C-alpha cells in the first residue's frame, strides 16, 4: 500500500515546500522597513477641511433627476483623499501623486499597526489616460511587481472588500468617465437623486468629524488643567465646549450641528470610549487625558445623562426612553436595584439633547446659557430625594409596577422638575 502511494509523495512534498517558501518569501517581498513616502503628520483639521471642500465641489446642489458634474482633482487633492482614507482606517500613511502628460503616478505608504515592528507596505502605481477610464500599466507592492494579468484581479478584490464596496456601488452608477488631462484627474459624474443623498451623508460625516477634532482639542485643554485630578464636574467640561460652540456658530451659522458634535464627544469621553474622530495615529493631535466626570457628585449620573443626550441627538429619542426604562427594570432583578435617580438622569439627558438640536434658536439659547456658567443646576434638577436601589420586593411593595399610579406620580414629578429648569425657557 505504501509502495503504491510513493509516486504521489514526491509531488505533494514539493507542493508543500513551494507553499511554505511562498509564505516565507511573500512578506519579505512586499514589506519594507523604510517608507517610500515621507510620513509627515498632518493635522486632522486640515485633512478634514480639505476633504470636505473636495466633496462640496464634487456634489451638485441641484435635486433634478440626473445632474452632470465634472471635477478636476489636483495631485494635492488626491493625496488629501488618500490621507483621509488612511486615517479612517487608523493607519499612519501617506501618498504622493504626479501627472506628466497622459501618465499618472502614485506612491503610497502605510505603516502596519504592529507595535513590535516598524514595517511598511509601499505601493507604486502607474496609469495612462484612456477612454473612458485610465489603464493601469504597472502595480508594484513592495519589491513585488504584480504581473499584468493579475492587476485587474487584485483591484477587483480590493473593490469587493467591505470597507470599499459601499462606495464602489455608488461610483459604478454615477462615475461615467475618468481622464488624465491637463495635469488633472478629471472625473465626470452623472448624479442621481439616490446618489446625491448618499454623498450628502458623506459630507455631513466629514463635517462632523472636523468639528469633533476641534472640540477634542478644547476638551484636552480643559482636563489637562493642573487643578483637575481624577475627577471633573460635567458642567466644568460643558462650559468651555459650549462657549466654543457659540463662537463657531457665529461663523458657520450651524448651531444645531455644533451642539450635536459637543454632545457626541462628551458621551464618548464620559463613558470611556475612544474620542479620536478619525483614528489619527500620527500623534499630531494630543490624546485627551482620562478623567471621571461627575454629575450630582456621581459618575453613573453623568454617564446616564450624556448617553441619553447622545442617543437623542443621533435621532433615537424613542430608543433613549426605552433603553433607560429597560435598564432600570433589569436592575430590579439582577443589578443594583431600580433607581429613580438614574431614571431622572436619563430623562434630563434626553430633554437636554432634544433642546440642543431642536432648532437654531434653541441651540443658540443653550450655548448662551451654558457658556456663561458651570452650574450644573442649569441642566440637572435636584434628585437626592428620589428613591433608588430598590430590589424586586421593595419596588413591588412601594410601587407595584411601572404602570401604577404611584410610579407615574414620581415620573411626572421628575419631568416637572426638568421642565422648570431655566435653560429650557426662552
Image (cartoon, helix red, strand yellow):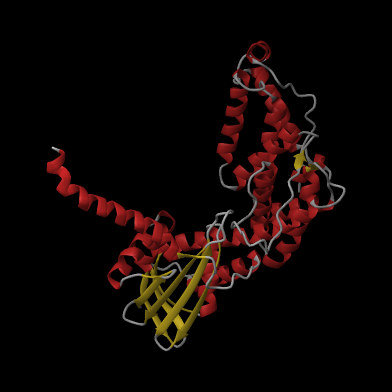
Q: Residue at x 56, y 38 (%)?
A: 318
Residue 350: % across, % down: 65, 40
Q: Is residue 203 visible?
A: no
The one of 37 and 388 positioned closer to us in this rendering? 37
Confirm whether residue 235 shows in the render.
yes
Query: Is the residue 69 above or below the residue 309 in the image?
Result: below
Q: Quadrant of residue 40?
A: bottom right
State the image coordinates of residue 361 (x, y, percent, origin top left).
70, 55
Q: Is 1 rendered above or below residue 251?
A: above
Answer with the quarter of the image where residue 258 lies: bottom right
Q: Depth check: 115 or 402 in front?
A: 115
Residue at horizontal 78 percent and vertical 35 percent from the top: 381
Measuring from the top left, give residue 152's x and y in whole percent.
31, 68
Q: Quick one: which residue is furthest to the right in this view?
A: 227
Q: Residue at x 41, y 63 (%)?
A: 195
Number of numbered tags placed on the structure image: 0
Figure quadrant of the N terminus: top left
Front residue (pair 173, 96): 96
List x then y, in percent, for residue 20: 35, 54
Left or right for 426, reference 43: right
With 373 as the anchor, is 86 left or right in this view? left
Instruction: Describe residue 271's horizontal placement relative to residue 178 as left or right.
Output: right
Residue ID at (64%, 68%): 41
Amino acid at each position: 500500500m505504501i509502495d503504491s502511494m510513493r509516486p504521489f509523495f514526491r509531488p505533494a512534498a514539493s507542493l508543500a515546500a513551494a507553499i511554505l517558501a511562498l509564505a516565507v518569501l511573500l512578506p519579505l517581498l512586499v514589506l519594507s522597513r523604510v517608507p517610500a513616502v515621507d510620513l509627515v503628520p498632518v493635522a486632522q483639521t486640515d485633512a478634514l477641511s480639505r476633504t470636505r471642500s473636495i466633496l462640496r465641489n464634487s456634489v451638485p446642489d441641484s435635486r433634478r433627476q440626473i445632474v452632470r458634474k465634472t471635477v478636476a482633482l489636483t495631485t494635492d487633492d488626491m493625496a488629501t483623499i488618500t490621507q483621509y482614507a488612511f486615517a479612517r482606517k487608523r493607519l499612519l500613511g501617506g501618498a504622493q501623486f504626479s501627472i506628466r502628460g497622459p501618465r499618472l503616478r502614485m506612491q503610497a505608504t502605510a505603516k502596519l499597526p504592529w507595535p513590535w515592528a516598524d514595517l511598511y507596505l509601499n505601493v507604486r502605481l502607474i496609469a495612462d489616460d484612456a477612454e473612458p477610464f485610465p489603464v493601469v500599466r504597472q502595480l508594484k507592492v513592495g519589491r513585488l511587481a504584480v504581473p499584468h494579468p493579475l492587476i485587474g484581479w487584485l483591484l477587483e478584490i480590493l473593490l469587493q472588500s467591505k470597507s470599499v464596496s459601499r462606495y464602489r456601488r455608488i461610483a459604478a452608477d454615477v462615475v461615467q468617465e475618468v481622464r488624465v488631462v491637463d495635469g488633472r484627474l478629471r472625473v465626470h459624474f452623472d448624479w442621481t437623486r439616490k446618489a446625491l443623498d448618499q454623498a450628502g451623508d458623506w459630507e455631513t460625516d466629514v463635517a462632523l468629524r472636523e468639528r469633533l477634532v476641534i472640540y477634542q482639542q478644547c476638551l484636552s485643554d480643559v482636563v489637562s488643567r493642573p487643578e483637575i485630578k481624577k475627577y471633573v464636574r460635567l458642567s466644568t467640561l460643558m462650559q468651555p465646549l459650549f462657549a466654543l460652540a457659540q463662537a463657531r456658530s457665529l461663523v458657520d451659522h450651524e448651531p444645531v450641528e455644533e451642539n450635536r458634535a459637543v454632545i457626541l464627544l462628551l458621551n464618548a469621553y464620559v463613558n470611556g470610549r475612544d474620542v479620536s474622530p478619525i483614528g489619527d495615529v500620527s500623534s499630531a493631535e494630543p490624546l485627551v487625558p482620562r478623567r471621571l466626570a461627575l454629575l450630582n457628585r456621581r459618575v453613573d449620573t453623568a454617564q446616564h445623562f450624556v448617553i441619553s443626550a447622545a442617543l437623542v441627538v443621533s435621532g433615537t429619542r424613542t430608543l433613549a426612553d426605552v433603553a433607560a426604562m429597560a435598564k432600570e427594570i433589569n436592575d430590579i432583578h439582577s443589578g443594583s436595584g431600580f433607581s429613580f435617580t438614574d431614571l431622572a438622569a436619563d430623562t434630563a439627558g434626553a430633554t437636554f439633547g432634544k433642546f440642543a438640536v431642536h432648532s437654531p434658536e434653541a441651540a443658540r439659547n443653550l450655548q448662551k446659557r451654558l457658556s456663561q456658567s458651570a452650574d450644573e443646576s442649569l441642566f440637572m434638577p435636584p434628585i437626592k430625594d428620589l428613591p433608588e436601589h430598590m430590589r424586586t420586593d421593595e419596588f413591588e411593595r412601594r410601587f407595584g409596577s411601572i404602570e401604577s399610579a404611584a410610579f407615574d406620580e414620581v415620573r411626572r414629578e421628575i419631568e416637572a422638575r426638568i421642565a422648570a429648569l431655566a435653560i429650557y425657557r426662552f
